Image (cartoon, grey):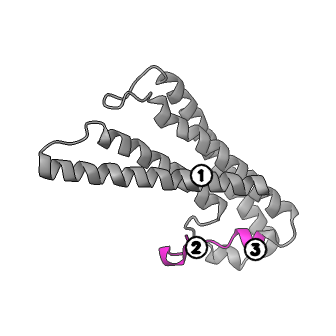
Amino acid sequence: MKKMEKIESLFGNMMAACLSLMGILVFANVVMRYFFNSGIPWGEELARFLFVWVIFLGSINALRKNNHLGFSSLVQVMPTIIKKICYLASCILMIVCLWQLFEGSIEMTLMTVDSLAPATGIPMAFMYGVGIITSVSMSIIVCYNLYRALFVKGAIDQLVVMKESEDEVKL
């Protein structure tokens, strides 16, 4: 469990660094365009790349903390065995979707290894590689949660409690 916390902390720090750098780049570009009628040529492109990474890393973090929005009112009143069946079905669907993301990300990463972004010169594989990291990380989390749901007594009640509005999501 300590490793999971370290990985979660690493992803959190990466998100914070990406957000900070994005904010600095965008602010600097706005100031330079307003006052000097020029900007950082590669700033927008790098900010876009960082934004994609923040979104994908944030998705991993939200899944780990069970903070994705969901509708669970019906599932919460079901008997435990039905909850487990519903949870199993949702995990299978997530794994299928994550497999598709993984396959597509591998394909796109391999196709774009030699392609460079026009302004920054960063390999475009950098953009698509985050899909590989996301799909593998989220698959591990889904499988771990599925194991807990099926074999740890009382875990299913913790796992099906979803946030039903943005106000309830704790950061």
Q: Position of residue 34 (x, y in %)?
A: 14, 52
Amino acid type at mark 3: Asp
- Front residue (pair 75, 134): 134
Identify the residue shown where x is 61% and y is 41%: 133
Q: Position of residue 136 (x, y in %)?
A: 66, 42
Identify the residue shown where x is 46% and y is 50%: 18
Counting residues from the start of the chain, the first of labels 1 and 2 encountered is 1
Numbered tag placed on residue 157 in the rendering: 3
Q: Quadrant of residue 38?
A: top left
Q: Position of residue 12 (x, y in %)?
A: 57, 56
Give the secondary structure at mark 3: helix
Asked if residue 54 shows in the view, the reply is: yes
Amino acid type at mark 1: Phe
Numbered tag placed on residue 163 in the rendering: 2
Identify the residue shown where x is 44% and y is 27%: 123
- How far apart in space, not on screen, are marks 1 and 3 (Cα)? 27 Å
- Residue for badge 1: 11
* Left or right relative to 70: residue 75: right
Counting residues from the start of the chain, the first of labels 3 and 2 encountered is 3
Identify the residue shown where x is 27% and y is 50%: 28
- How far apart in space, not on screen, are marks 1 and 2 (Cα)? 22 Å
Amino acid type at mark 2: Lys
Q: Nearer the viewer, mark 1 or mark 2?
A: 1
Image quadrant occupied by the C terminus: bottom right
Q: Nearer the viewer, mark 1 or mark 3?
A: 1
Residue bounds of the magenta highlight: 156-171
